[in-house]
Image: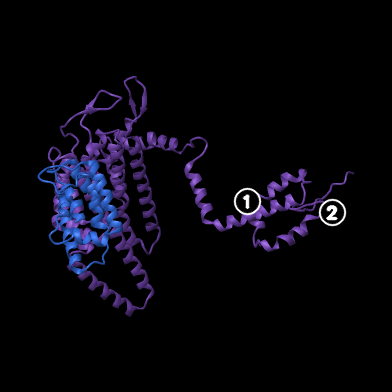
Chain colours: A purple, B blue
């Protein structure tokens, strides 16, 4: 139904959205599980749709700005006035993307506290246990899983009122708590990974970013979880703990972000003209670096450094190690390269094919020279010899090269001068 | 009229539930009519006094019925008379509103799941 505009406009009306959000954010022990998870799925889908539309709109604006730059000043003025008119229309049109997003944001920001309550890790409920241990626990449940996704989508919406509302609560601390409690829940880990990726890489509000990092005490939390890298089973057999992939992934994200911030601030100090402007930018963008520096000053501050230099480094080295003699990423890179110059590849294949045909047709008295032929017919040598290759010239080339001084076929053989050493 | 006899199947009284197997046959037949005889079917279903959509919304807990309902709401041509088009729009609005209500805790899990799937 989302694909049909009329339906989508009805769904995005305030009344409909209020109902869906109310169903989605019903308390943990109220309503029914199916009702909550179904309405959360619909709500997340609606927000994803808004994000898509926003992205398309931004893309359009960028394209417009680019075309405006190429035109004359008069035209720019004209275009800008047209845009303003359109914006006015958008603001007054209840079915416009802007109005619908504003309604959604308005409803969601009032529900943030309820969401924080839902995401608590200590709800009472029917207990279950894993097949490998006797410890009983309340399962995470679809509601909390989809609610984590909802928070991630709310961050992706990039709206200031939502950032403010999220910062005012302990939502992110609660999510971190869930990660600690549900160490083996891969679904939760995927959502949390996505959430932190959004916060670190796609969020342009530095205050919000800082607030999330502070609230979760992410570095220390990761270091603490990293300490429990192994899970000891009842048989005393050790296996890798369930949360380690997430811990490694987020830690690497933070380390990369710190490096990126360092490299961004470097040119600002080197460039004398741009120092004034970019230095201020540099300081404002060093959120992760500043946060990690602050964490290092705390009581357990050394833990993060120990984790990065120890277990994290070891894990990354292990992950880089080729499995079964090949590294998948390297293979895919090669494939990409081959795909890009597909035409060139086809020409090379054709050239090799004709060459091979010529050898076959001209007889096989080249046993001794086979090794040389192989060397010459490799891809690398083909790069040089195949330039300007034309199929029409094949016959001519064949005629020229098929007869050597011995009257035998030399097709595909490169003739070279050899200085014979005369024995004294 | 034959269509009356066909749609009598979903006009149940009170909380009486539909037979899932028979619903499957019903779904198959209505789907066929939607694709081959839409010009005769749509004016009947979306006639001003018709209760077909309401009855289908009532029985949305049946997967087959929810599939037919989805088709009736989304796969309709737009070359009908203006009166019928207006009626179609009104019924579609009503259906969306009711489907959103189906996400609530007051109805069964099947209502929730099928409502969510259609939306």
The quarter of the picture where the N terminus of chain A appears is: bottom left
Closer to us: A160 or A118: A118
- Horizontal and vertical percent for residue A80? 28, 74
| Discs 2 and 1 lie in a common subunit | yes
Q: Nearer the viewer, residue A362 or A376?
A: A362
Q: Residue at x 33, y 63 (%)?
A: A59
Q: CA distance from mark 2 to mark 1?
A: 29 Å
Residue B55: give x, y in percent of width and height. 15, 51
Q: Chain of mark 2?
A: A
Q: Residues within 10 Å of mark 1 (few under 14, many from 20)?
A: some
Q: Is residue B40 above or below residue A73?
A: above
Which image quadrant is residue A264 in? Answer: bottom left
Q: Which mark is residue A82?
A: none
Question: In the rendered image, is residue A207 in sight?
Answer: no
Q: Most extreme residue toward the bottom, as rendered? A: A74
Quadrant where the C terminus of chain A is found in the figure: top right
Q: Is residue A421 left or right of residue A61?
A: right
Q: Quadrant of residue A400?
A: bottom right
Q: Is residue B13 left or right of residue A216?
A: left
Cβ atoms at labels 2 and 1 below 8 Å apart = no
**Which of A300/B70 is in front?**
B70
Instruction: Specify which label sits upstream in the sequence, 2 or 1.
Output: 1
Farthest-out residue, left: B14
**Please, what secondary structure does the residue beneath circle 1 have?**
helix
* Residue linked to disc 1: A379
Name the residue located 22 percent from the left edge and 52 percent from the top edge.
B69
Indicate left or right for B21 with A404 as reference.
left
The residue at the point 35 percent across, 48 percent down is: A257
Name the residue located 67 percent from the left edge and 50 percent from the top edge. Answer: A377
List x then y, in percent, for residue A211. 22, 47
- Above-or-below relation of B17 to A70: above
Say which chain tag 1 marks: A
């Amino acid at each position: 139904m989302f694909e049909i505009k009329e339906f989508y406009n009805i769904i995005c009306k305030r009344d409909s959205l209020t109902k869906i959000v109310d169903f989605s954010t019903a308390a943990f022990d109220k309503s029914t599980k199916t009702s909550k998870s179904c309405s959360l799925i619909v709500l997340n889908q609606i927000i994803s749709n808004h994000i898509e539309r926003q992205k398309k709109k931004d893309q359009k604006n960028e394209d417009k700005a680019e075309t405006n730059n190429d035109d004359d000043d008069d035209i720019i003025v004209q275009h800008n006035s047209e845009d303003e008119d359109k914006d006015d229309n958008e603001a007054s049109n209840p079915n416009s993307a802007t109005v619908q997003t504003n309604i959604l944001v308005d409803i969601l920001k009032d529900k943030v506290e309820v969401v924080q309550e839902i995401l608590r890790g200590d709800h009472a409920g029917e207990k279950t246990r894993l097949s490998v241990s006797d410890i009983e626990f309340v399962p995470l449940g679809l509601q909390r899983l989809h609610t984590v996704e909802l928070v991630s989508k709310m961050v992706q919406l990039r709206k200031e009122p939502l950032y403010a509302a999220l910062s005012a609560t302990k939502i992110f601390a609660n999510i971190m708590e869930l990660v600690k409690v549900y160490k083996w829940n891969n679904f939760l880990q995927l959502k949390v990974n996505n959430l932190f990726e959004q916060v670190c890489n796609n969020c342009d509000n530095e205050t919000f970013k800082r607030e999330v990092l502070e609230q979760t005490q992410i570095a220390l939390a990761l270091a603490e979880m990293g300490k429990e890298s192994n899970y000891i089973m009842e048989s005393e057999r050790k296996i890798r703990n369930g949360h380690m992939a997430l811990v490694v992934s987020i830690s690497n994200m933070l380390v990369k972000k710190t490096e990126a911030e360092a490299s961004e601030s470097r040119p600002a100090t080197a460039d004398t003209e741009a120092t004034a402007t970019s230095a201020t930018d540099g300081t404002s963008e060093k959120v992760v670096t500043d946060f990690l520096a602050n964490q290092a000053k705390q009581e357990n501050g050394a833990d993060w450094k120990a984790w990065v230099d120890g277990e994290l480094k070891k894990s990354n080295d292990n992950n880089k190690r080729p499995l079964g003699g090949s590294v998948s990423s390297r293979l895919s890179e090669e494939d990409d390269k081959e795909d890009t110059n597909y035409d060139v590849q086809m020409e090379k294949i054709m050239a090799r094919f004709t060459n091979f045909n010529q050898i076959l047709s001209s007889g096989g008295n080249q046993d001794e020279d086979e090794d040389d032929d192989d060397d010459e017919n490799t891809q690398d040598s083909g790069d040089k010899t195949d330039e300007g290759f034309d199929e029409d010239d094949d016959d001519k080339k064949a005629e020229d090269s098929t007869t050597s001084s011995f009257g035998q076929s030399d097709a595909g053989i490169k003739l070279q001068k050899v200085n014979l050493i005369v024995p004294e | 009229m034959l269509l009356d006899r066909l749609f009598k199947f979903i006009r149940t009284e009170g909380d009486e539930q539909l037979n899932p197997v028979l619903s499957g046959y019903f779904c198959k037949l209505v789907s066929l009519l939607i694709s081959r005889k839409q010009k005769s079917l749509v004016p009947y279903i979306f006639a001003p006094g018709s209760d077909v959509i309401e009855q289908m919304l009532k029985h949305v807990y049946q997967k087959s019925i929810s599939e037919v309902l989805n088709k009736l709401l989304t796969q309709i041509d737009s070359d009908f008379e203006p009166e019928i088009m207006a009626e179609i729009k009104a019924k579609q609005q009503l259906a969306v509103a009711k489907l959103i209500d189906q996400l609530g805790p007051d109805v069964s899990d099947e209502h929730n799941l099928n409502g969510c799937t259609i939306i």
